Image (cartoon, rainbow, N blue to C red):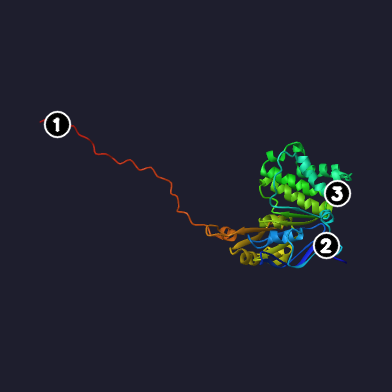
Amino acid sequence: MTERISLRGVGLRLGYHGAAVVEDGRITLRPGQVTALVGPNGSGKSTLLRALARLHRPETGTVTLEDGVSALDLAPRDFARRVTLLAQSRPTPGGVRVRDVVGYGRHPYRGRWRAGDPGGAAAITRAMELTGVAPMAGRPVDELSGGELQRVWLATCLAQDTGVLLLDEPTTFLDLRYQVELLELVRDLADLHDVAVGVVLHDLNQAAEIADQVVLLCRGRVHADGAPAEVLTESLLTSTYGIRIEVTRDPRTGVVRTRPIGRHTEPTRARLTKPAIPQPAIIPAIAEAAIPQPAITEAVVP
């Protein structure tokens, strides 16, 4: 059976001002799968993702799409109909309503004066509903919180309606509820809509929860790639991050769980197996017996 591929980078050398940041980078995004890029700060995760989005031109190597076409040879409009990126940060336009910002995602489909996009309105509405920003459609985006704005930019990516979705640390600025909801949405896009997702995450447990494949980077090289259980091991993570990382399995779901062990952190196994410290016996207090007092005799005057 032929392997289905949406976007692939092979042999990528990426750098800034002549200094290499990624050497021999490789990554494959497949339809219906989530691929998480993890690793310490400065390991090259975001640079590798940006190369897939054509925002960082490789010095060597190739980036190809599912039909074998080089991503670097496509016209910008054609590429934008196939791949979209949610970057770490974007400028906030002043005085522009949420619905109009989400509409930016339809730019690859529009001609001059926003003409020629019959499916645009439906795509915008669907994207806002999926990301939970529909109730704020009429609000100016410069009045939103950081978490609300992040969801608006994600809706913009979904409105672009591509087969490949790239996300660079998408849970930044989000509280716990919206982190969970965003990652569930990412998983749904892969499962229900056959989207190929590449996502940079710092939280290893989030990567283990939603990813089909994990790419672990260290000092600009791919240290390991494969299923979460194959990559997120104690030996690989400890050597990559330079700190002991404990790995366990959720007994109910079987999902990998990671936990860094610092000087003041007690390993789970040690905590579970530590023998109980015997406590001193507690002896109930006994009321002292009444001590007989000497009889007091009145003095007798002779």
- Residue 222 appears in the figure: no
Marks 1 and 3, how far apart in space? 125 Å
The residue lying at 22 percent from left, 35 percent from top is 296
Q: Is residue 196 left or right of residue 268?
A: right
Q: Position of residue 298 (x, y in %)?
A: 18, 32
Q: Quadrant of residue 288?
A: top left
Which residue is tagged 1?
300
Residue found at the very far top of the displayed protein: 301
What secondary structure is found at the residue carrying circle 3? helix
Q: Nearer the viewer, residue 156 or 32?
A: 156
User: Pointer 3 and pointer 2: residues touching (CB < 8 Å)?
Assistant: no
Please give the residue where the numbered disc 2 appears in the rendered image. Answer: 73
User: Above or below — where is 3 with respect to 168?
Assistant: below
Task: Give the class, few, some or many, for how many residues have Cα within 10 Å of label 2's Cα (few <14, many ≥20).
Answer: few
Q: Secondary structure at mark 1?
A: loop
Disc 3 marks which residue?
109
At horizontal 74% and vertical 47% (from top left) the residue drawn is 153
* Residue 253 pos. (x, y %): 72, 55
Earlier in the chain: of badge 3 and badge 2, it is 2
Q: Residue furthest left?
A: 302
- Mark 1 is on which residue type? Val
What's under tag 3, amino acid-wise?
Answer: Tyr
* Mark 1 vs mark 2: in front: 2
| Sequence-first tag of 1 and 3 | 3
Question: Which quadrant: the N terminus?
Answer: bottom right
Q: Nearer the viewer, mark 1 or mark 3?
A: 3
Indicate the secondary structure of the residue bearing disc 2.
helix
CA–CA distance between discs 1 and 2? 128 Å
Q: Position of residue 244 (x, y in %)?
A: 59, 63
Of all residues, the one furthest to the front in this rendering is: 112
Which residue is depicted at the point 48% across and 56% down? 278
